[in-house]
Amino acid sequence: LDGGRDAGRNFTVQEGLVAINATNALSSATLVMNGGNIDTRSSGGDLTVGGNNNQVWNADFSFLGTNNLNMGTGTVNLGTAAGTSRTVTVEAKTLTIGGTINNGTTANSLVKAGAGNLALNGTSNLTGTITVQEGTLSGTGSVGTILVANGGTIAAGNSIGTMDTGSLALDAGSTFALEINTTSLANDLVNVSGNLSITDGALLTLADLGGDELLTLGTVFSFIDYSGIWDGGGHGRTE
């Protein structure tokens, strides 16, 4: 899609591939995903869609990730189709969703699959769980209850930043990807409004985006704050 669609009409993806290659490709149309794949192959590389188009996710779909694609701040609804969850497979790069995500008629949860990154920068009103099955869930949004499964990664922010969650569970084999800056003393933070569960075998990775400065003895980086019950897989905690 290289030009505008008819304003106010739905654009429905049933199967196959739709490449969104221009900021005005969807005009003001609602993007309805009934399956299939989306991608962006813009000659300019990464693309931000300019219409803040609403979306309806009636089925599982994939983002192929030739370039990064930002879908703006339009509202996402999980649609009227049967099922309790929708699977979004991000094969590569980053798919950014900046709008509010709402329950569908029966669907109230989300599964993130694929090796790429799904960045959620808006508010999730889903009453179910977002499960990170593969790849990375990132962003600065308020994203509800999160389960990071074996092979999945959670990374607050879109670089260093803050993510708000409901309850957060990190399974064995999952990864918490933490970024800090030893120059500015900034760091990622996940605010957990609920219980925090970390199973033995969950991993913490650390990347310094600063100058690898020598830190003063006693410097503290707080990267998880929670309000509920701690379940640390038999390990203690420092507060």
Image (cartoon, helix red, strand yellow):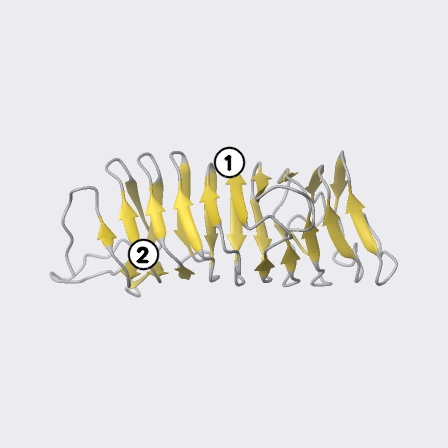
As drawn, 196 above or below 88: below
Q: Which is nearer the N-term, disc 1 or disc 2? A: 1
- Kindly state the secondary structure of the residue where label 1 is placed: loop
The kind of residue tagged 1 is Ala
Residue 21: x and y, percent?
Answer: 75, 48
The residue wearing badge 1 is 115
Depth check: give the residue in front, 38 or 32: 32
Residue type at tag 2: Ile
Locate residue 220: give its quadrant.
bottom left
Return the residue nearer the eye: 6 or 103: 103
Q: Nearer the viewer, residue 83 or 238?
A: 83
Q: Position of residue 42 (x, y in %)?
A: 72, 47
Rendered location of residue 191, percent (x, y): 35, 62
State the image quarter where residue 72 is shown: bottom right
Horizontal side of 34 relative to 185 (left or right) equals right
Residue receiving disc 2: 180
**9 sits to left or right of 210:** right
Q: Crowdedness of circle 2 by 10 Å Cα count: few (<14), some, many (20+)?
A: many
Residue 149 visible to the viewer? yes
Q: Is residue 98 visible?
A: no
Along the line of sight, the residue nearer the viewer: 144 or 84 = 84
**Secondary element type, mark 2:** strand
Kindly report the distance in space between the C-alpha atoms of the residues bearing marks 1 and 2: 23 Å
Q: Nearer the viewer, mark 1 or mark 2?
A: 1
